[in-house]
Amino acid sequence: MRRRKKRRKQSGSRSVTNEPRTMYFTAVLPNESISQEIHAFKQYMLDQYACKVALKSPAHITLYPPFHMEIAKEANFLEQLSKFNPNMEAFEVEMDGFDHFGNRVIFAAPKENPTLADLRNQLLVWMRDSLGIFKQRYFDQEFHAHMTIANRDIPEESFDEAWDYFLEQDFENRFYVDSWVVFKLIEKKWQILKRFSLK
């Protein structure tokens, strides 16, 4: 029985998907005071329930969720993003207590904000049309702005106790949004890569 000869790999045929990749996402940031408050709540969840995922990033409200991209495309990606112009003035976001997604995520909840939703929707469309970065489910699902406190690592048996704690906390604050940022995952932590002004 003859053995089939192995095909030689052609030089220069390396797939783009084999290039070094990492993850990116876009968001708006609160002021320093709110950032510190959110960090303190995250620290509480770490100390009490060993929840550490949310500590990988500073306080933020996600606009375009994390996606993978080749690092070699980063410079062009940022250059193209600099052309995005939502044509809006700075606006206020008001925080009002806490909420949760099921029993896996606890977050600080902004009040409904049409301007924030408009910024998010404009960015979704622009990234799809100008960069080809697109997931249909982001268009299909309702925008639910939030600042994560614990992210999918709350022990199931501890959720009710943790949620009771946040029900007792008073968290009302507000901040102005005059820019948005791109985060990059570097050594398993999210770091701010670039900030863009609204105007």
Image (tube, rainbow, N blue to C red):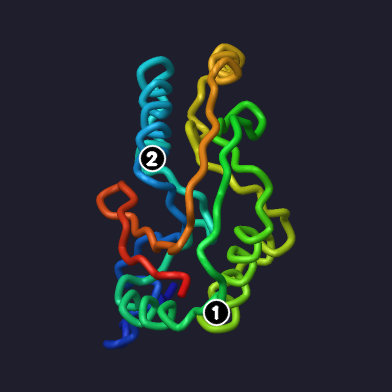
- The numbered mark, 1 or 2, whose residue comes first in the sequence reads 2
In which quadrant will I find the N terminus? bottom left
* Residue 118, horizontal then vertical, whole percent: 65, 65
Is label 1 or label 2 in front? 2
Q: Is residue 44 left or right of residue 107?
A: left
Q: Mark 1 points at which residue?
A: 132
Quarter of the rendering containing residue 101: top right
Q: In this view, does 75 lie to the left or right of 96?
A: left
- Report, in whole angstroms, how far the alpha carbon at label 1 lies from the one at label 2: 32 Å
Instruction: Look at 51% across and 79% down and name the residue there.
Output: 85
Quarter of the rendering containing residue 172: top right
Amino acid at circle 2? Ser
Amino acid at circle 1? Gly
Instruction: Look at 33% across and 74% down and name the residue there.
Output: 74
Instruction: Look at 54% across and 73% down and name the residue there.
Output: 133
Label 2: how many Cα within 10 Å (few below 14, some 14–19, many 20+): some
* Residue 150, horizontal then vertical, whole percent: 48, 31
**Where is 117 relative to 158, above or below?**
below
Q: Mark 2 points at which residue?
A: 35
Q: Specify whether residue 6 is in view.
A: no
Between residue 187 and residue 144, name the one nearer to us: 144
* Residue 152, horizontal then vertical, whole percent: 52, 33
